[in-house]
Amino acid sequence: MTQDPTRILVCDDETDVREMLEEYLTLRGYDVSPAANASELREILAGRDVDLIVLDINMPGEDGLSLLRSLRPENPVPVIMLTAAGDVVDRIIGLEMGADDYLGKPVDLRELEARLKAVLRRRQSVTEAPADTGAGETARFGDYILDVEAAKMATSDGEELKLTAMEFSLLKVFARNKGRVLNRDQILEQAHDRSWDPFDRSIDIRISRLRRKIEANPEKPQIIRTVRGIGYIYDPSGD
């Protein structure tokens, strides 16, 4: 049976950039829907499902960050943000809002495809039970219990916490390394994503975002703690 092509939504107000990305990704077998602004993006999402959004931050009218804020957390579709080459602040804000990755402009097409594939692999690990997952594998994070096999996190009363693909990958890494200090490089390796730079703040930002979801006091985390100068440790007891 032939597999349906991966559906990519490219939203960028620059016609040349939008057409370049559409042509490149289409030639590589992706089903690409172009959008020039937030209104067109919403119209596409209302009419079809997509597997990933490539979203420019700096657009006139409603910019990419505002659009991302309106999508999260109800819509967990993976998002790769396109940012100005040196715009670190926008990248940080985008990650804090739930973007899955970012890429600076001008866009390197091969790097975009590599990051796109990495994000989609993480999404697949959330929507499909991994082959090496043991039945009933769970871990407690505050009031929530992570069910690795079902790829979801919920309270004992069934209240589910929405997770992005990367958040699930990070939680799974911590669950399988309880009580062990992990440095950033180890986290990258076990999350199966080498597209990050271990010295990049993106890891810290994503963990900070996780803490806001699971910690009673995110400013004084007890479940995923920082080990100064080394990395992070998962302690479900909060001791």
Image: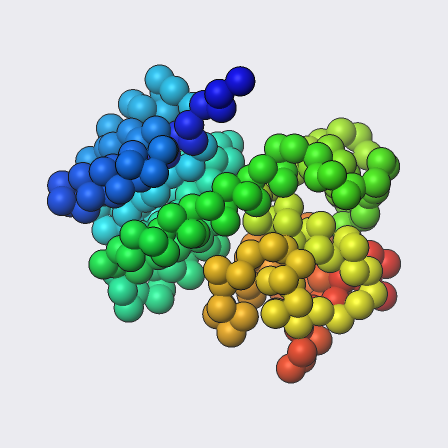
118 and 38: which one is in front?
118
Question: Is residue 202 visible to the viewer in this orientation of the structure?
Answer: no
Quarter of the rendering containing residue 158: top right
Q: Is residue 52 above or below residue 190?
A: above
Q: Is residue 206 above or below residue 62?
A: below
Seen as rendered, the residue at the extreme bottom is: 229
8 left or right, relative to 106? right
Quarter of the rendering containing residue 23: top left
Please state the horizontal and vertical placement of residue 203, each as a whole percent of the image.
Answer: 55, 63
138 and 106: which one is in front?
106
Question: Is residue 123 visible to the viewer in this orientation of the structure?
Answer: yes
What residue is rendered at 74% in x and 67% in y?
233
What residue is rendered at 71% in x and 39% in y?
130
Seen as rendered, the residue at the extreme front is: 1
Please state the horizontal and vertical placement of residue 15, each as a whole percent of the image.
Answer: 13, 41
In the rendered image, the quadrant that contains the C terminus is: bottom right
Color style of the picture: rainbow
Q: How many numbered discs? A: 0
Please state the horizontal and vertical placement of residue 193, each as a whole percent of the image.
Answer: 55, 56
65 left or right, relative to 3? left
Q: Is residue 227 above or below residue 36?
A: below
Please state the horizontal and vertical placement of residue 29, each as a whole percent of the image.
Answer: 36, 33
Quarter of the rendering containing residue 30: top left
What residue is rendered at 18% in x and 39% in y?
19
What residue is rendered at 28% in x and 68% in y?
86
